[in-house]
Image: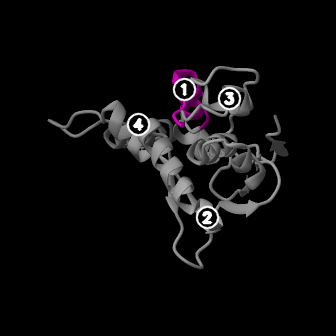
Amino acid sequence: MSYRTATNILIGAGALALSLAVAPAAGASAPSAHQRTVLATTTLYYDDSQAAEFKSAVVASAQVWNSSVQNVRLVEAASGASAQIRIVAFDGWPQSTLGPVRTGGHGTVWFGREAVNEGYNTTRIAAHELGHILGLPDNKPGPCSSLMSGSTGGVSCTNATPNASERSAVEADYAGSAAMAAAPLDRGVVADTP
């Protein structure tokens, strides 16, 4: 058998093997958009052991984010387990690491009592600060309907749900394999003073 014939046979066999590996089996359908999203979901664990009196607000705000977006999940870390997000109660104004925090990265939310003492809603504060962890900058000044408007939404604002634009930005930051492959970011800390 000539070298050229053997090479053509090997190339043809390789192409056939590749097409069989990539093509779905007979009768199988391609994964739906939802299945692809679920496969690509990034799970970030948070440690709220130092959140003190704000632990329930942190849990509620994580649930808000989990019901609002699909490409990232916020899950409470088991006691003593490693976490990408650390929540710490302290006496100043709230502040957070500006993400997006990725698997292998880390960020901190400093849950500031000063904002609570001024009358701001604790679940909104927590959801806003987790928004920073997920990569959203402040949107000040802004209306109450914008979670990232922070304190400019007013003391009476209790909205803890991201709007469509905020949800879309987080979904894009954690979309598909690009989010999994991206290096963890450290873009500094955002302080949420009025």
Q: Which colour scheme is used?
A: one colour
Magenta stretch: give its range. Answer: 160-173
Whole-Å distance between the Cαs marked 2 and 4? 61 Å
Magenta region, main secondary structure: helix
Depth-wise, is mark 3 or mark 4 nearer the camera? Answer: 3
Whole-Å distance between the Cαs marked 1 and 3? 24 Å
Q: In this view, does 97 lie above or below 151?
A: below
Q: Mark 3 points at which residue?
A: 154
Q: Name the residue under label 1.
A: 168
Quadrant of the snapshot with the C terminus: top right
Sequence-first disc among 2 and 4: 4
Q: Name the residue under label 4.
A: 15
Sequence-first disc among 3 and 2: 2
User: Which residue is painted at 71% across and 63% down in the image?
Assistant: 88
User: Which residue is painted at 47% across and 43% down in the image?
Assistant: 64
Depth-wise, is mark 1 or mark 3 nearer the camera? Answer: 3
Horizontal and vertical percent position of residue 171: 54, 33
Q: Mark 2 points at which residue?
A: 53
Whole-Å distance between the Cαs marked 3 and 2? 22 Å
Left or right of residue 99: residue 60: left
Sequence-first disc among 1 and 2: 2
Which amino acid type is shown beneath numbered disc 4? Answer: Ala
Residue 192 in view of the camera: yes
The answer to which quarter of the image holds residue 129 is: top right
Whole-Å distance between the Cαs marked 1 and 2? 31 Å
Quadrant of the snapshot with the N terminus: top left
Q: Residues within 10 Å of mark 2 (few under 14, many from 20)?
A: few
- Callout 4 secondary element: helix
Which amino acid type is shown beneath numbered disc 2? Answer: Glu
Q: Is residue 55 above or below residue 160?
A: below
